[in-house]
Image: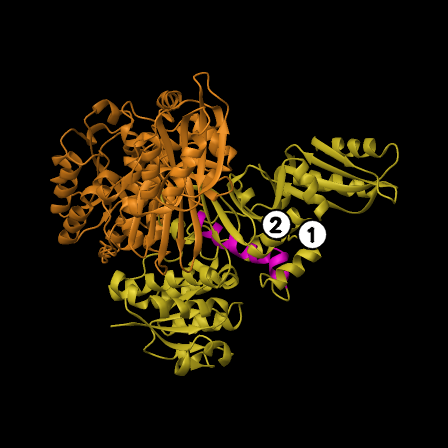
Chain colours: A yellow, B orange
Amino acid sequence: MAVKIGLVGTGTVGGGCIDIINKHSGAFQRHLGTDIELVRVCSLSSAEAEAHGVGELFTDDFHDITNDSDIDIVIELIGGTTVARTVVLEALAAGKNVVTANKALMATHGEEVMSAAKAAGVELAFGASVGGGIPIIGPLKHSLIANEVSTVMGIVNGTTNYMLSKMSEEGMSYEQALAEAQAAGFAEADPSADVDGLDAAAKIAILASIAFYSRVTLDDVYARGITTISPTDLDAARDMGYVVKLLAIAHRTPEGIDVRVHPTMIPVDHQLATVNGVFNAIYVVGDFVGETMFFGEGAGAGAAASAVMGDVLEVARHLTQGVAPIVGCTCTDELPICPITSLSMKYYMRFTASDRPGVLAAMASVFAEHDVSIHSMIQRGAGADGTVDLAYVTHVAREQDVRAAIDEICALPDTVKGEPSLIRVEE
Amino acid sequence: MAVKIGLVGTGTVGGGCIDIINKHSGAFQRHLGTDIELVRVCSLSSAEAEAHGVGELFTDDFHDITNDSDIDIVIELIGGTTVARTVVLEALAAGKNVVTANKALMATHGEEVMSAAKAAGVELAFGASVGGGIPIIGPLKHSLIANEVSTVMGIVNGTTNYMLSKMSEEGMSYEQALAEAQAAGFAEADPSADVDGLDAAAKIAILASIAFYSRVTLDDVYARGITTISPTDLDAARDMGYVVKLLAIAHRTPEGIDVRVHPTMIPVDHQLATVNGVFNAIYVVGDFVGETMFFGEGAGAGAAASAVMGDVLEVARHLTQGVAPIVGCTCTDELPICPITSLSMKYYMRFTASDRPGVLAAMASVFAEHDVSIHSMIQRGAGADGTVDLAYVTHVAREQDVRAAIDEICALPDTVKGEPSLIRVEE
């Protein structure tokens, strides 16, 4: 008996899923004994659906899928937290298993949809919500479960990694890199979810929830994007032995979960430093396994569709063999979230400062007053406007002290022009 | 009801498993609802067992485990294919689930033990047999199943990677690097399984069987080790833009499975080129997911024990929830193995040649006769004994042509001294 699939959403990833089913369903039957059949496809665009040969499977009303008693698994690939949430909840309520790639939904309404799946006795799989095609949720929930995980950290947004790679390698400005990413199809017309760090924040919320067995939602994640990063900062970073990446970071600390997304300076010889372009990589540290890293294409039709269909086949295999859902919600612990101001780490700061005697000394004394000890400093040539660039990297300091020092320096008369740059440093 | 575990073998990995159970069994119960209890430990060394506080669980007769009707899961960590095979087969016959890290057993008697597990209706898990703690078998059997995999390739032996790193970075000879690896505990007193490539061959046989759904055994794998690699070759490789790694390689080709282990030159900017020391990394290419890589510690107590206990918890979770074995043998296809002589690729060759007129021309004409086209050549300074080092990298050529050319060159009068080096090149 074939496991019957309904697909909602025929964008890039949905199209990739249809292609996989068309190309490989014979192999799935031969290799896994799993017969899957696509029986209904919902899309707002009949043209988009037709481009993948959907034919008479097409509908533009998702209720034709959620209400179809023949359908065993609903694939939700609309994205967002409005219609997608309704589709998922209605499908679950109708007793259907759901596979989704929707990180925003899982990071915002994860508890609601997981509970609905449990109540209905069905599976809800979301392996494609993080890392494109990179297997990461599966390994965290299975192969690595014997570990207490201390860190999950990675490059989980391909768009911003592509832009930072371009800015770093080719000296492009933020605006140029964005335009190029849009032209290459790696950035949306409205790029804010990517460049403001919210996409990465949703993903690290999901990873942290799984790794630490404690619920972390999108709202818990401190998120800063790359919009204020300049080629000047990338140059200064390189001169100091670092590269800048938009990292999504989650650490287990004695005070709770430290979870955040922001541009981060990492040493040039760090495993994550050489992950360029649209590639993603996720680094996991466990108390027994030590350091592991998972690398692959973070975006693109094929990679995300690979992850979605991996979940579909897993659920289909369970259905075929009469296996009840194995892994439900695992947020059994209730760990607090550390406020960003409680952090201590190294910081990079860059000021555009007046090129006059006494400025360096004045700034140095403010740092000292606030217990911020400087590890290295680079001054770059005088600007035509009588300014110089002063880039500092601190020793480990408290975030609240660093912020207070910056505020005080900015308030000094005739010292700093414009907004300073602040980039956190992970060793 | 606790799932009861019997452990056979208290070496490095077995000790790590006991440590994990002691440290984390409370967490497993809280997070996964899985209660595991170690009830019997078999070892030839009561002192080794006692070092992990085994106490009255100790036995030196494995039958006390395989015959104990209370035991649900047997962990086999003896290694080898003699006693280990008996332990595994007797445990399976007694209806016990088995978790093993034994690559030699799986690569040699995989079909026999998988069939025995199927006949008994129990699970046989072997995730720790490849890549230490790196999740790779799980992802191949689950997250990546929607793909047709074209390549699995990696650094899967930590000992030889440590030695090659030392030889390359510090100019050590093979003998020095081996002595250092032995002193550091990374190489056995008898290092042959590592340095001759047989450990890596067993691992790639297992990975190829899973990735290509076709049985590949240890005997099918062409294996060459690192014993003939010299610092001179590593230097020449670097000058030509390559590093040398002992790679385990499996490609799907139109003619069948190309599977082999040998020292391999890869470009310095290849993802695998920066994997140094005892780290392992496995690179997988699928038709939809594209390139992925899995990186981590390939050896050591903690990493391998993490993988073993990941399997134990998975099986225990299935037992607790009454789930029948999900994934058995998946070797449904019968693909042929490509003979090594049918390969075409690039080759590095180095000869110690007479430093006299006419040698280069004579060698060039032999290459030409055999259709071996040279991409680059480096000649290094004359030796005290009137010889020069000639290092060549070819364009893509047929292995049989390259071997014939080398044989003919070696037979030329007064041309080549000693054995030439031959290293295959993957781009």
Q: Which mark is residue A172?
A: 1
Residue A427 visible within the image? yes
**Which sits in the foreground, B427 or B127?**
B427
Residue lying furthest bottom in this view? A56
Q: Secondary structure at mark 2?
A: helix
The residue beneath circle 2 is A165
Which quadrant of the structure image shows residue A380?
Answer: top right
Q: Sequence-wise, which precedes: disc 2 or disc 1?
A: 2
| Segment tinted magenta in the rendering | A191-211
- Residue A58 location, x and y as percent? 43, 81
- Residue B54 location, x and y as percent? 25, 29
Residue B64 located left or right of residue A113? left
Residue A148 visible within the image? no
Which amino acid, mark 2? Ser
Q: Is residue A170 magenta?
A: no
Residue A46 located left or right of residue B339? right
Residue A364 located left or right of residue A39? right
**Which sits in the foreground, B178 or A354?**
B178
A118 shown above or below A58: above
